Image: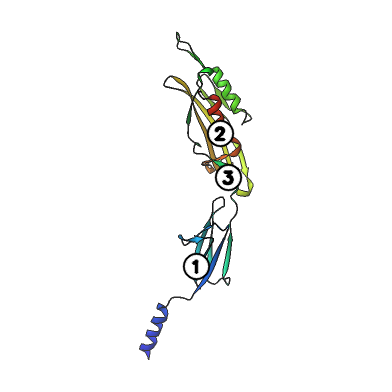
Amino acid sequence: MKKFLSLLIITLLAMPAFAKDITIVASPPEGVIKVNGSYYGEGSAKVKVKKDDFVIIEVSAPGYETLTTRVYGRDDRKTIEIKLKEDVILKQTVESSLANQFFSVRVNPALYTDDPETGHRNSEKAWKLVHNILLNYVDEIQTSDMASGYVQTPYVIKSYVEAGKTLRSRITIKESNIGGDLTFQIKVSSEVAPIQGRNREESYTETTRMIKELEPLISEFQTRLGAK
C-alpha cells in the first residue's frame, strides 16, 4: 500500500500543472506579440498558461510605445486585449541619420575670396549667411568666433509631456579647408531625457530623433551655403 501511495505521489508530482488557453489581442491589429521573448504572431495569439504560473507578453508596433505585461493563469478572462499608446516622440519628431555627427558642406566660391598674393581668405560673407540661416531656427547664437572659425548655438529644448520626455538640440559649425576649398563642418546635436530629469546633465543621452522644426535646417545649409 505504501509503495502504491509513493508511486501515486510521484506520478502526480510529475504531471504538468493544469494549463488554460488565453487569447491575446493586440491593438493596433498589426501589433507584434511575443510571449516570454518568443514571436507568437501579429494581431492575436493563443497562449497556454499554467494556473499557478504566468507568461510575459510583449506587444510592439511602429509608431506606438512597446508594452510589456504579465498574464497570470489564474486570470478568469479567456481573451485579453492589449492596447498600445501612440508614441508622441515618433509623431512629433523626425529621424535623422545626420544627428550627432559632423557633415561637410563645401561652400559656394561666391561666398568667399582668396588673396593670391597674401594667401589671406576672407570668409565674412559666408559666415554672415551662416548666422542668417541659424537665426531662422534659434533665438540667439551662444558662441560666435569667426576669427577661429567656430559658431555654436545654445540648446533648443522641447518637452513632450504625453511621452514624458524632453528633447534638446544645438548646432555647432566649424570652418575647415578640405582640398583648399572653404568647407564648413556642421553638427546638429540631439539628446533626450525624461522630463523629470531634464535639469540634470547626466540624464541626457544621444538620439537619432530630431526636433521637427529643425529638420529643414540641414537642407538649407546644403542648398544656400553649398557650392553650385
Q: Nearer the viewer, residue 26 or 65?
A: 26
Residue placed at 35% from the left, 88% from the top?
A: 3
Which comes sooner in the sequence, label 2 or label 1? 1
Which comes sooner in the sequence, label 1 or label 3? 1
Q: CA distance from mark 2 to mark 1?
A: 48 Å
Cβ–Cβ under 8 Å for marks 2 and 1: no
**Label 2 element class:** strand
Instruction: Please say if 193 is above or below 61.
Output: above
Mark seen at residue 170: 2
Q: Give x and y (percent) for residue 198.
A: 58, 42
Farthest residue, direction front: 228
Query: Where's the N terminus, which quadrant?
Result: bottom left
**Label 1 element class:** strand
Residue placed at 61% from the left, 36% from the top?
A: 213
Cβ–Cβ under 8 Å for marks 2 and 3: no
Instruction: Please say if 36 is above or below 167.
Output: below
The type of residue carrying mark 2 is: Arg
Residue at which label 3 appears: 197
Q: Nearer the viewer, residue 31 or 164?
A: 31
**Label 3 element class:** helix
Q: Nearer the viewer, mark 2 or mark 3?
A: 2
Whether residue 196 is visible here, answered yes or no, is: no
Q: Nearer the viewer, residue 186 or 217?
A: 217
Q: CA distance from mark 2 to mark 3?
A: 19 Å
213 vs 110, left or right, is right
Q: Give x and y (percent) for residue 170.
A: 56, 33
Residue placed at 54% from the left, 51% from the top?
A: 62
Q: Give x and y (percent) for residue 227.
A: 50, 23
Cβ–Cβ under 8 Å for marks 1 and 3: no
- Please rate how many residues cluster around mark 1, counting C-alpha atoms within 10 Å: few if below 14, some from 14 to 19, many from 20: some
- Please rate how many residues cluster around mark 3, counting C-alpha atoms within 10 Å: few if below 14, some from 14 to 19, many from 20: few
Mark seen at residue 14: none
